[in-house]
Image (cartoon, coloured by chain):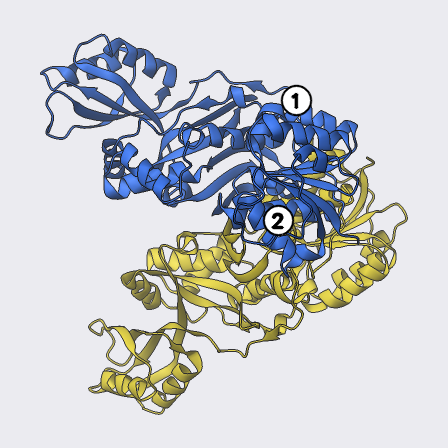
Chain colours: A yellow, B blue
Amino acid sequence: MKPLKIGILGLGTVGGGLLEMALGNGPLSKMVEITGVSARNKNRPRPVDISKIAWFDDPSELAKHENVDVIVELMGGADGPAYHAVITALKAKKNVVTANKAMLSAHGVELAKLADENGVQIRYEAAVAGGIPIVKALREGMAANNIKNIMGVMNGTSNYILTEMAKTGRPFGDVLKDAQALGLAEADPTLDINGGDAGHKLALLCALAFNGEPKFEEIELEGIERVEPVDLESATFLGFAVKLIASAGLNDNKLSQSVRPSLVALANPLAQLDGALNAILVEAEPVGTLTFIGSGAGAGPTASAVAADLVDLFYNDVRPLFAGPCITNSNIEIAPKKSLNAKFYVRFNVADKPGVIAKISDTLARHQVSIESILQKPPTKPDNVAIVLTTQKCDELILIDAIDELSKYDEFIGKPLIMPILN
Amino acid sequence: MKPLKIGILGLGTVGGGLLEMALGNGPLSKMVEITGVSARNKNRPRPVDISKIAWFDDPSELAKHENVDVIVELMGGADGPAYHAVITALKAKKNVVTANKAMLSAHGVELAKLADENGVQIRYEAAVAGGIPIVKALREGMAANNIKNIMGVMNGTSNYILTEMAKTGRPFGDVLKDAQALGLAEADPTLDINGGDAGHKLALLCALAFNGEPKFEEIELEGIERVEPVDLESATFLGFAVKLIASAGLNDNKLSQSVRPSLVALANPLAQLDGALNAILVEAEPVGTLTFIGSGAGAGPTASAVAADLVDLFYNDVRPLFAGPCITNSNIEIAPKKSLNAKFYVRFNVADKPGVIAKISDTLARHQVSIESILQKPPTKPDNVAIVLTTQKCDELILIDAIDELSKYDEFIGKPLIMPILN
């Protein structure tokens, strides 16, 4: 078989990792030839010498180059140059391999259509969970299954921060600064922390597993910014870990999709997941539950996923972009947000006055929400005390109503933190 | 695309599960049509009605039927009718999907050659770790990686027995009988218990990852028959779980492959693996370590893997049988057996006489083997007392020499149990 001629757009960490694989002695070196590269800065230090590779200032010029079979897009960004270059490549009938979850979440349907019209493919293993071959597992390994639930930790930065907060008892802001200094968080960490990055990944997995189209805007998103040391301490005391959980599931043909901090039982493999790892559990019929764990980011793991897509194209393996064979039911509805029925963790911040616990318990009782456990340590700051409770199973909307009612009392400070409790 | 015409040989648990998928409403039903089935007993009760499906008394007749694209071989057995039918199918230019690890371990190279000559494929996702798509992950998802190590729990029956022994303190024989009564162990459990079944699976994974050919006879095999309640109790006390570990790794271009009971640190995901689950850790460059967990047996999981192979064939995806793109080095040597350098667990059975511990410690010291910990409980049976010790890192061959020397003393009863300690 003839090597694929590839053009690489973007030579950051992942692009550098891919160059090392393509120019080294490993398997990929026999399957690809690099026609050219394009990036913002030609002279930035890189792990390999690129002086002998053709350089293109304009990514779109490389994207439509006659001597290119596959464009590898590693620039990032939902719109702008990456999007423009991918459109150009597809119109020029080039296959596209991309790690760009933001772009696919926003424009996946349009790009899928354009690829179809031009008889080429878009591959995106690297866009979800770095080195874990989860796109392949869902699209091919579980192809004949009906997917019921997906649940995972899909953002290493926020997992690292939560892990460090739990270990050290230090507050969110301090740990985030350290993570930035260590290179474990971006200078602008917004998407990692607010659940957006995990949401982009979940949208792609849901497209594969459930509805055939990524629908990022339909995902319920909540980040980890409001998680405090007291929450991690309380969760540990109760026998849980706090994780930013991306989850999606079908119930009565309604699809719930959310990314939110959640309490996870210690027996769940997700609870054990420390540091920058990613893990995904998929529950399906008839295979049961499969668990995948690995590095969710970094040069090596992400380049490994890009390379796997290139190997698939080398073998001329043609698969549907989103609507894999596992899509049997196109009548799936999207469940309304906050429609979860579960046990919940609630942390109130209150002024330490008599009757606060009575107000909480009365109000919840009136809304038929049963308290399972309640924790309050002797106050160190009487003007701001954390009261933590867990509920029996209830509808989240009813719980929110009860909490809204409590907020009218002066003793209650700010918005309580609500996290679902998962087994 | 046109549905694949398939013939199914063998209608046991997995065959029944596959029939349910193919005749149901799920994704597979749109991709395959059943030309015929063959099994030992036409009238055995089955989960689906097969009266409208063409029945073949002779599997080889179906295997070469003109109206068949793919033969699904689920009869089992390394030789005999399964082997004969697969040979017949390949010669008749039919693709073959099989769950038969024993056959592929024994005849894989010959069958691969025959498939090549006839321009057809053999697929065997179901032969390794049931529903876990590990063949696909190694062959495709990690295709551009250099594989360094594979370590896993690949036999659910022995894992169930060890888990139950640890929980209940009951001896091997009793737990095995219960497992047989519950249908969790075969009437003839030999291959599950002596490491043979896990060895067959490891041989296939090593073919994919390292040497391009399954070489079952080169795997160091030791079963769980000699593990006693005292070993599980001691391991727990020392902070480890006992698991039947299948492992293979490259060191200095030498390949070590073994299946043997081992002590696994509790932080390792394999230690947490209870019951009939399988788990596999693959360490590779550049992706790092990937972990896969799921059901290793049973109708649903295994049929899911068979169906994934059928979906691949439906999409006309052509891949090398064993020597995937990850095979870059054909000069790999096989390491001699017992060449492990590790910490070890040793359980001696001795008569409770003065000086036994002195003999053990003197002899090990003379062989430069350092003791890390030693456990002896007050004896309940003075004629047979268990002494458990763990060593510092040492060469297993040296440890075996020291132990052989000890066996000349009358106080030492039987052959000590040696298990490596893994992190």
Kind of residue at badge 1: Ser
Q: Residue at x 32, y 23 (%)?
A: B418
- Which quadrant is home to the N terminus of chain B? bottom right
Chain of the residue under label 1:
B
Residue A204 lies in what quarter of the image? Answer: bottom right
Q: Which residue is mark 2?
A: A141
Residue B179 at x, y = what percent? 35, 41
Mark 2 vs mark 1, CA separation in Å: 28 Å
- Quarter holding the C terminus of chain B is top left
Q: Secondary structure at mark 2?
A: helix
> Disc 2 or disc 1, which is closer to the eye?
2
Residue B201 placement (x, y as % from top left): 53, 33
**Do the residues under discs 2 and 1 have CB atoms within 8 angstroms?**
no
Judge the density around disc 2: few (<14), some (14-19), many (≥20) Cα neighbours within 10 Å. Answer: many
Q: Position of residue B146 (x, y in %)?
A: 61, 33
Residue A304 appears in the picture as rendered:
yes
Q: Is residue B46 left or right of residue A164?
A: right
Q: Position of residue B115 (x, y in %)?
A: 73, 30
Which sits in the foreground, B12 or A396? B12
Q: Which mark is residue B330?
A: 1
The one nearer the camera, A372 or A154, is A372
Q: Choose between B299 and A312: the one closer to the eye.
A: B299
Q: Is residue B194 above or below residue A409?
A: above
Report the amino acid beneath label 2. Gly
